[in-house]
Amino acid sequence: MRQPQKLLSIVIPVYNEELTIGDIIDRVKAAAQQTGLRDEIIVVDDHSQDRSLSEAQRHGIKLYTLTQHMGKGYALRAGFSKALGDVIVTIDSDGSHLPEELSEVLEPVLKGRADLVIGSRYLNNKRVAARRLNVSGVKLFNRFIQLLTGVAITDSQSGYRAMKREVLKGQKLKSGTYEIESEILVKTARRNFRISEVPISFEQRTYGRSGVDPMVDGFKIWVSIVSAFIRG
């Protein structure tokens, strides 16, 4: 008997990205079709103050909106709770990630070589345009995570990921903001899932302003790493 085709869930958190969200959704749709999988695209609007919600509504996807601004982590958790896929992908909505690289991020999971795949900005010779402060901070987090878990990662903070549904099952995620990437990574490592990376391109946003506060969010990431390691 022929096995049913896998379902791919792509979760996109959005906050004040009216200039990019429509284009990202269209490109994600096209990239998902190229995988040959059934797919669902889930956009979670984190109570945007611009026209992000109305822009997303025009593109025929599953759309959820939070009643107040809660943060990226909360938006992703809301999306995960709605996702039905066998494989779940996360991608940022500001245009920094290329939807056209979706198949590359998915490949190790689909071929059974990994349970969680992180799209790394710092592998090989892919195009990367990131602020120096961001690069230094990521390196520190990488080393700390490796020290605790033994897992060597070059881009622990990347939001472009693919994972089997089983990776998230049983993870009681608590992150509200940008520390969610670290929380997922450490908890996945603690449960001995296979983790790998693939090189991705990256473009730092050239308009608007990032919601990341290096001091406040950096501290939250440190706390999240320790908490996820201790509590598993």
Image: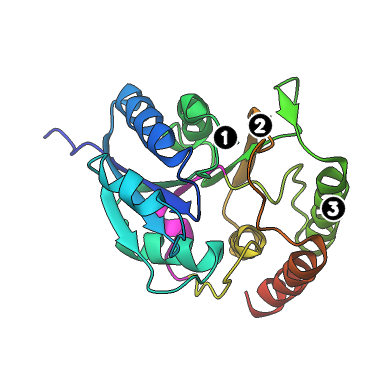
Vertical order, 26 against 147 (above or below): above
Query: Please, what secondary structure does the residue beneath circle 1 have?
Result: loop
Per the image, the residue denoted by label 1 is 97
- Judging by the rendered image, the residue that carries numbered circle 3 is 137
Please name the residue shown 30% across and 26% down the image.
Answer: 33
Q: Are marks 3 and 1 in contact (CB under 8 Å)?
A: no
Q: Position of residue 223 (x, y in %)?
A: 75, 74
Q: Residue at label 2? A: 202
Q: Dot 2: few (<14), some (14–19), or many (≥20) neighbours within 10 Å?
A: many
Q: Quick check: is 161 in the magenta stretch?
A: yes
Q: Are marks 2 and 1 in contact (CB under 8 Å)?
A: yes
Amino acid at circle 2: Phe
Is 156 situated left or right of 25 in this image?
right
Please tell me which residue lies in front, 43 or 158: 43
For the N terminus, the image quarter is top left
Residue 132 as seen in the image, left or right of residue 199:
right
Q: Earlier in the sequence, mark 2 or mark 3?
A: 3
- Magenta span covers which residues? 160-170
Q: Which amino acid type is shown beneath numbered disc 3? A: Gly
